[in-house]
Structure formats: C-alpha cells, structure tokens
Image: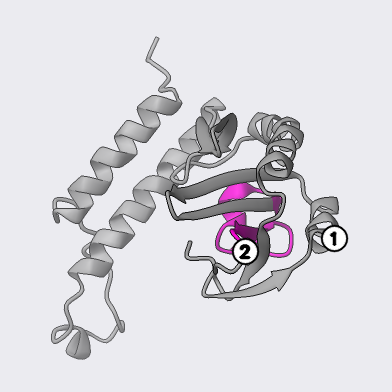
Amino acid sequence: MSKVYNTDDLIQILASERQACLKGERLKLEVTVSGNPVIDQFIRTDGLQKFTAYQEFKAAIHDYQREYQVSGIIVQEVKVKGKTLRYPEVHPQLIAISDDLEILKEAKQSILEFWERVSPGMDLYLSFNSGKQYQQIKQVDVDRIILRTEWASLNAFEKSDFLEIILQLGWGKPDEACYQRGFPASGSEFIHAVNPGNLPIG
C-alpha cells in the first residue's frame, strides 16, 4: 500500500517545489506573455514560466488533498500583551477540506473572545483596497461584520513602542477568501486594532 502524505508532508513538498521553480529548475515552457511569437521573442518570460509551473504543481497538491481528504489545517500561536492563543488556520499554500471548515467554525468563538480581551481601548480600522487603505470604525461596526462571519484568524505585531492586532473575519472557503477570488461566496474583512493615535502598518 502506498503512503498517503499528511499535511506536514505536503507543506514540505510545496516548499521544495517552490524553491525549484524559483531557481528555474521547473518551467512551464509553453507559457508566453502575449501569445504572439514575434513579440514574445523580445520579452523575458522566465518569471511567468516559473510562477505558472508552481501554480500548476500547487493545484495538483490541492487535488491530492481533496482525493485523500488531507487537511490543510496548521496550528498557529499568537502572543499579545502577555496572553497566548493557539488556534487552527489553513496553511496559505493549502486548501481547506470540508472537515477543516468545521474545525475553523468551532474555533471562531475562542478567537473572538481572545480579541475582546486584548483589544479594548485600541483604535479600530477596517482595511480595504487589498489592504492599501484603512477606515476608522467602531466596535459596533465590527459586531455587524461578526454576524456574517463563519471563521476567524488573528495576527499581531508587537514591539516595545507599537502594537497592531489584525483580526480576519471570513466566510466560505479560506483559500478563496484572502484575495477575494471567490467573492461573494467566500471573502473576508480585516480589522486592525492599534494603540490610540497610531495607524495600521500591516
């Protein structure tokens, strides 16, 4: 019986393949920039060929996950103000299978409770335009977004003179939510909490 690769195996395989693609060891040679052979001979296509080769390999790994029901979940740990939270999150190079979505939904409440413990008194901002712009909001606005949220994720940047806590509130498939590829069925909003008077940087 052949071995079924687990989540950690797939992460390692993807990391190795990504390095091979970046080094030019894997290229999707038939990829061209314009499709016109006269024009394409004057344009460097190796970057696009490397990117496409990796994307195709990653898609094959995602097919493998679906076929063998290999989870895309990893355990993350965030530390803020001396408090620690461990929570499940889908690895950025993998997809969530159906069981993973249930795990994420079950973890949502503990993430929100942690957020409520570490963010009081902080200024809140909603990011938009792919995180290039921010609009200050109130907790009541966050509460409205939470109503449609199926799962959540948390990240923090803490230094002696700066703190930013980023709460991702999502719905649908996490791998389609991050860059709004699956919108409106999948999507997410990012809430940034910063110390009063500061602006988000992440």
Q: In the image, what residue type sits under mark 2? A: Pro
SS at badge 2:
loop
Above or below, comparing residue 44 to residue 167 in the picture: below
Near mark 1 (Cα within 10 A), the count class, few <14, some 14-19 or many ≥20, is few
The residue lying at 57 percent from left, 57 percent from top is 178
> Residue 11 colored magenta?
no
Above or below, comparing residue 100 to residue 175 in the picture: above
| Residue 182 picture quarter | bottom right
Query: Could you tell me residue 6's position as x and y percent?
Result: 44, 22
Left or right: residue 78 compared with residue 140: left
Query: Could you tell me residue 117's position as x and y percent?
Result: 71, 39
Of 179 and 51, which appears nearest the observer? 179
Residue pointed to by mark 1? 140
| Residue 145 picture quarter | bottom right
For marks 1 and 2 on the same chain, the one whose residue lies earlier in the sequence: 1
Q: How many marks?
A: 2
Q: In the image, what residue type sits under mark 1? A: Val
* Nearer mark to the viewer, of 1 and 2: 2
The answer to whether one can see residue 30 in this image is: no
Query: Could you tell me residue 15's position as x and y percent?
Result: 29, 40
The residue lying at 61 percent from left, 64 percent from top is 180
Left or right: residue 122 compared with residue 81: right
Of 192 and 3, which appears nearest the observer? 192
Left or right: residue 11 compared with residue 64: left
Q: CA distance from mark 1 to mark 2?
A: 18 Å
| Residue 10 picture quarter | top left
Numbered badge on residue 39: none
For the N terminus, the image quarter is: top left
The answer to whether one can see residue 145 in this image is: yes
> Residue 191 colored magenta?
yes
Numbered badge on residue 196: 2
Please give the range of residues in magenta.
170-196
